[in-house]
Image (cartoon, rainbow, N blue to C red):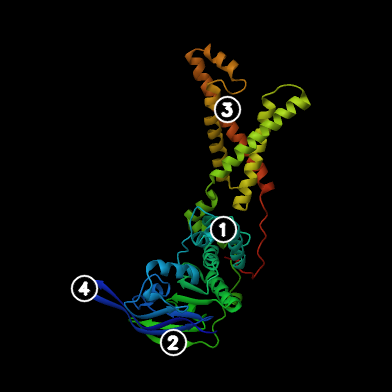
Amino acid sequence: MESALITLRRVEKDYESGAGTVRALREVDLEIKQGEFVAIVGTSGSGKSTLMNILGCLDRPTRGVYELGGFDVGARGSDARAILRNRLIGFIFQGFNLLPRTTALENVELPLVYRGVGTRERRQWATEALAAVGLGDRVHHTPNQLSGGQQQRVAIARALVTRPPMLLADEPTGNLDTRTSLEVLALLQNLNRERGITIILVTHEHDIAACASRVITFRDGRIVTDVVQTVPLDAAVELKALPPPDQGGAQGSEDADPALAARRRLGGPIPAVLYVTMAVAGIGGVGLGVAYASLVLGVPSTWVPAGFGFALETVFGAWFGGKRFGRPLTSDQRTRVALTYTLLAACVLGPMFAVGVLPGSKPLLNRLAELSSGGVLAALGVTAFGLAAVALARYLLISLVSPLVAPVAVPSKPGAAGGHA
């Protein structure tokens, strides 16, 4: 620990309400050095949340001086405070605050987007941050494919990616069970010890605060105690002392929470670029089919290129899906891919057939012109049946191929970070 990172001198904060002025903070004097692990404890209404907002440059004190890294925060405007937040502070929230339809990697990259970091460097920093919190094999998973502990680790990686000197954690274990809470606390302690990151943890639980090297207690907007703990609770040791986790716990939690079970069954959203990938592969497959039919078979054929395109598009779709989601596609995802792509292809090829542009369409159009209204309806029924058969065949082929092309996840070693998160 070196110089003071945070200095508060006689800081006060007032709020106006219908009943009059509420004094949330009263003459707070506080100094936190670089490299400390500080827990701020207090009941609801004690002023700890107001202090957190001021420390995080989200609010300014009514009176007094707040200096962060030598900068007087209270004397700066909102834009200058935003720059300080982005450069000096990483935030960890109780509710994770992850974007639900983006991957862990994209969530972690977000602060770097605001900073204007280039794509390649941004991707590298985000990958390193996820590896640092034990999620190197989960970079392409969306939040609904991660446990609560893993989501909190993504939130910590997002806070770390800008390489700030300070992490501000607001009830980071409030939504987690005991084992996962200890895993998160062990990770924070390791970041503090190994990297020298200043950590300020706001909590109302004294057993969580016991893991900090310094505990500051608030009551009625004032500091009532400021205690340095020479031997703070080691979360990693406490974690090892817990009984082994119930191997059936994951299944049991899904049974107890039908919504969680449904999310795991459905999988993540299907990115639009997947269909573009399949379309490009299909066009390439048609080209290969034409070359094979003419050069090898020596006969013009519409079935051979169609077969090549069909096979290639599904293989590419399964490959892209496995790469994107880091596992074989779920049954629901395969169904959505097969149905959506089949309908999209029909919407593109149907008009081409109707105007006679599609190869082989003119003889069929001439035949349709000879049919009665009943015959046309029968032809439409056969077409609908054919589309359903194509969608089913596409689903079965994706199901067959996706386990072969999906990356194999490396299981976590017992006791490793994130092993049970």
- Residue 49 placed where, x, y %? 38, 74
Q: Name the amino acid type tagged 2.
A: Asp
Measured in 3D between alpha carbons, the distance from the residue under mark 1 to the one under mark 2, in whole angstroms, is 43 Å
> Which mark is drawn over residue 226?
2
Secondary element at image label 2: strand
**Figure quadrant of the C terminus:** bottom right
Mark 3 falls on what kind of element? helix
Tag 2 or tag 1, which sits nearer the N-term? Answer: 1
- Circles 1 and 4: CB atoms closer than 8 Å: no
Of helix, strand and loop, which one carries label 1? loop
Q: Residue furthest right?
A: 296
- Cα separation, mark 4 vs mark 2, equals 32 Å
- Of the residues tagged 1 and 2, which is closer to the observer? 1
Name the residue carrying label 3.
386
- Seen in the picture, residue 282 relative to 126 is either above or below; the reply is above
Q: Nearer the viewer, mark 3 or mark 1?
A: 1
Q: Circle 1 is placed at which residue position?
A: 118
Q: Which residue is labeled 4 in the image?
A: 19
Mark-to-mark CA distance, 1 and 4: 51 Å
Q: Which of pointers 2 and 3 indicates the residue nearer the eye?
A: 2
Task: Give the class, few, some or many, for how many residues have Cα within 10 Å of label 2's Cα (few <14, many ≥20).
Answer: some
- The answer to whether residue 206 shows anywhere in this view is no
Dot 3 amino acid type? Gly
